[in-house]
Amino acid sequence: MSDVLAHDGGAPVRTAPFPSVQSAEGRTLGVEEESAVLAVLRSGRLNSTVGEVTRALETDFAAYYGVPHAVASSSGTAAIHLAVAAVDPEPGDEIITTGLSDAGTVLPILAQNAVPVFADVDPATGNLDVASVAARITSRTRAIIAVHLFGQPAPVVELRALADAHGIVLIEDCAQAYLTRVGTDGALAGTVGHLGCFSLQQSKHITAGDGGLTISSDEALARRARLFADKAWPRDTDERTHLFLGLNYRMTELQAAIARVQLTRLAGVVEDRRRTAATLTDVVDGLDGLSAAPADGNSYWQFPVFLDTHRTGADAHWYARALQAEGIPASGGYIQRPLYLTPVLAERRTYGTSGFPLTDPPADVTPEYHPGLCPVTEELIDTRLLVIAWNERYGPGDVADIAAALTKVHAHAIAARGILEPRTGRIASRS
């Protein structure tokens, strides 16, 4: 292996592709899923209102998580929308969440005519900071949506206590956090809040291509979520009516058939991800200025690395480009900008040209989305957060290549510390 970085003309550490969620090599799909789909096709019942597979998935998932209620839906975003709709906010009510997530965390808030309020995050994890959330609670706050980013446990025990003290609802976004463990008693993420939301999208720990599940131990919230997913049609009363404004977010029997089999593979997927992540964690934590995510309870949807740029001499975006040149799947910042700086929020692109509910809420809660709103969030995205793709199919050789490339790139950064231009990695002028 050349000591010269690949993006400077040296030989890359890796030329073969890694197992990826975008191909069969990085997924656990097999003949059992194929048989389950064929059984549904042969039954002729592909819709969950006439089939039995979706209801069976809900039963299986609720039992897996030790809760009484699970509601299937068409996507992870839909699963969060079900949860927000179950809260039933008034137009202009506030829901506190993070700016460091997929937009699926926030769009359901707007879709229910509520106002997203953004709290800052913990610099060591990128998960919500409890003190920041507490500072943003007002008389209009109806809920908190906490994201377990990359599979790291968010402080939902503390957030649940905060929610209960203020009479509001805690929703857990577990799209990236299957079998993540939280708190000192190791409760499963999704079971601490009033509602927990999961995704079956292509890149998640288990997949049906798309799909979502919303769980709860609260019967009233679960029933409202179920009704919302099916046009508020109470099919259990055999009455064709619509009790409130709902949508059609039903999961198909084909999705459910795949997901039921995938659920049987979940424990092994998470175990494999944790085992290989432990090896890379030891390497990362031994490199000056780099730190891996805490391992406790983590289910490693991705492998985040946090940089102290004063010590590394280069930021996460430079590291990501250098790693990509070495053949390693990596990115800087996870998202390009905080969610509150995307056009839908910063430019109020919601319903036509109205900007509602962001331009016509009660006067005392008019939201402002601007740079500097959440400084830690912005610092992570701009400079400090490096994300390495992770997969249950990684073997020792894959992890060894990632470790070798990261060590190589880091050594170059440290050697040039103080003279690297931000984000480019070029030697800066000393004049």
Image: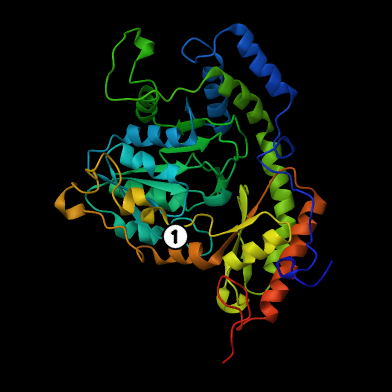
Give x and y (percent) for residue 208: 59, 29
The residue carrying pointer 1 sits among few (fewer than 14), some (14 to 19) or many (20 or more) residues within 10 Å by Cα, namely: many
Q: In which quarter of the image is residue 364?
A: bottom left
| Residue at the right extreme of this rendering | 1
Along the line of sight, which residue is nearer the eye, 62 or 72?
72
- Quarter holding the C terminus is bottom right
Question: Which element carries disc 1, helix, strand or loop?
Answer: loop
Q: Residue at x 59, y 40 (%)?
A: 204
Give the image's coloring scheme: rainbow
Along the line of sight, which residue is nearer the eye, 253 or 409?
409
| Residue 417 located left or right of residue 157 | right
Q: Residue at x 60, y 27 (%)?
A: 259
Along the line of sight, which residue is nearer the eye, 9 or 325?
9
| Residue at the front extreme of this rendering | 9
Q: Residue at x 70, y 17 (%)?
A: 35
| Residue at the left extreme of this rendering | 363
Give x and y (percent) for residue 2: 82, 69
Above or below residue 109? Residue 402 is: below
- Residue where numbered disc 1 is placed: 121
- Quarter holding the N terminus is bottom right
Along the line of sight, which residue is nearer the eye, 242 or 350?
350
Q: Which amino acid does label 1 sit on?
A: Val
| Residue 167 located left or right of residue 40 | left
Give x and y (percent) for residue 269: 69, 39
Work out whether residue 96 can be spotted: no
The number of discs equals 1
Give x and y (percent) for residue 422: 55, 74
Work out whether residue 227 can be spotted: yes
